[in-house]
Amino acid sequence: MSGIHDWDTFALGDRTVTRLGYGAMQLAGPGVFGPPKDPETALAVLRQAVARGVNHIDTSDFYGPHVTNQLIRKALAPYPDDLVIVTKVGARRGTDGSWLPAFSPEELTQAVHDNLRNLGLDVLEVVNLRAMFDTHGPAEGSIEAPLTVLADLQRQGLVRHIGLSNVTPTQIAEGRRICPIVCVQNYYNLAHRSDDALIDELARQGVAYVPFFPLGGFTPLQSSTLSTVAARLDAKPMQVALAWLLRRAPNILLIPGTASLAHLQENLAAAALALPDDAILDLDHLAQT
Ligand SMILES: NC(=O)c1ccc[n+]([C@@H]2O[C@H](COP(=O)([O-])OP(=O)(O)OC[C@H]3O[C@@H](n4cnc5c(N)ncnc54)[C@H](OP(=O)(O)O)[C@@H]3O)[C@@H](O)[C@H]2O)c1
């Protein structure tokens, strides 16, 4: 089986990663809460992703909580030298599985230590501060206080690089006055393109943009245009959605999530899917239809 080592790459902090990575959130139980239904398959998905050349895995200790990080450690430690594990802090889970803000200095410090312990690392390569002013999308509000705490943890050597998630351009500008920001992780896909201008701006600056929900997340993408284009190319709709994102901008790093080995294979194969100009044109118009 061919690997993905010759894929296009992009900088993430001071590392270089292949542009098609893997998001681990789907490996926890239903609702990203509790253990997976099938732990052996979860471990196999992680191992297969890395065996196929994925060297960028996105996670958080609030997935489960703790579950995906513990699976990553069990499946992959000792980690390959080129593997970049990106995690995020700023939220916690209620006992009912709800997603709650966790921005206090104590909660942020605890979250960094929880990630280190559960991943079995001495230093976290990239930590995204996940804004929670509105759980479902970016909303204005100062990130100065929590980011200052994270920057302190960086100075202590526990965090190598810092990114931001679920943020507005104003918050990115505010963040840069506190510490270097190596990536932005926001909601973006074929059908949800609020960040078009931001992506282009970050591309000009050489900063990675990592779309979460690249396949639609909890509501997987469905569109007749997508299905028609996929049929024309003899590909799967989700492969076309990923190939379009790879074409959209050179700074886009993908972290599609799946708990299925078959879907993992499909998603990784999207890197080799060439999209002809007429397909791109149809897909570009999809958000407006
Ligand atoms: N920063 C944030 O706030 C934030 C928020 C959400 C997610 N994230 C990160 O972003 C990553 C990606 O997001 P996501 O996993 O929520 O959503 P996603 O990648 O958009 O979609 C995942 C969904 O698509 C399905 N799927 C995956 N590959 C498929 C295929 N080839 N064919 C059909 N269905 C397929 C998965 O089901 P199966 O398991 O059945 O394949 C799952 O239901 C997460 O893993 C997480 O690391 C970050």
Image (cartoon, helix red, strand yellow):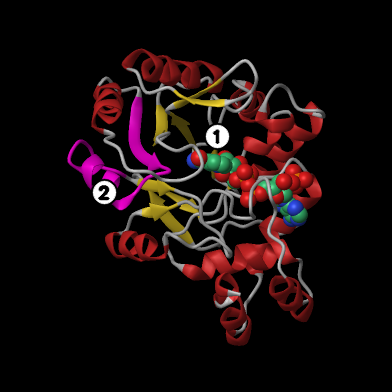
Say if the magenta span includes residue 137.
no
Q: Residue at x 66, y 26 (%)?
A: 71
Looking at the picture, tell me which residue is in the foreground, 165 or 234.
165
Q: Which residue is mark 1?
A: 59
Q: Where residue 170 is drawn, which disc sits there?
A: 2
Left or right, 212 with respect to 48, comes to left
Ligand 1 within 8 angstroms of badge 1 C-beta: yes
- At numbered mark 2, what does the secondary structure look like: helix, strand or loop? helix
Total marks shown come to 2
Circle nearer the N terminus (1, 2): 1
**In front here: 158 or 101?**
101
Specify the segment rendered in magenta.
159-181
Above/below status of 283 relative to 152: below
Residue 241 percent location from the top left of the image: 64, 65
How packed mark 2 is, by other alpha carbons closer than 10 Å (few <14, some 14-19, many 20 or more), is: few
Residue type of the residue flagged with mark 2: Thr
User: At x 60% / y 73%, what residue is drawn?
Assistant: 286
What is the x, y in percent for residue 283? 60, 75
Rendered view: 232 above or below 116: below
Observer-nearest of 76 and 205: 205
Circle 1 SS class: loop
Q: Quadrant of the C terminus?
A: bottom right
Question: Does residue 137 appear in this view?
Answer: yes
Across and down, in percent, residue 46 comes to 68, 37
Single out the mark in the foreground, 1 or 2: 2
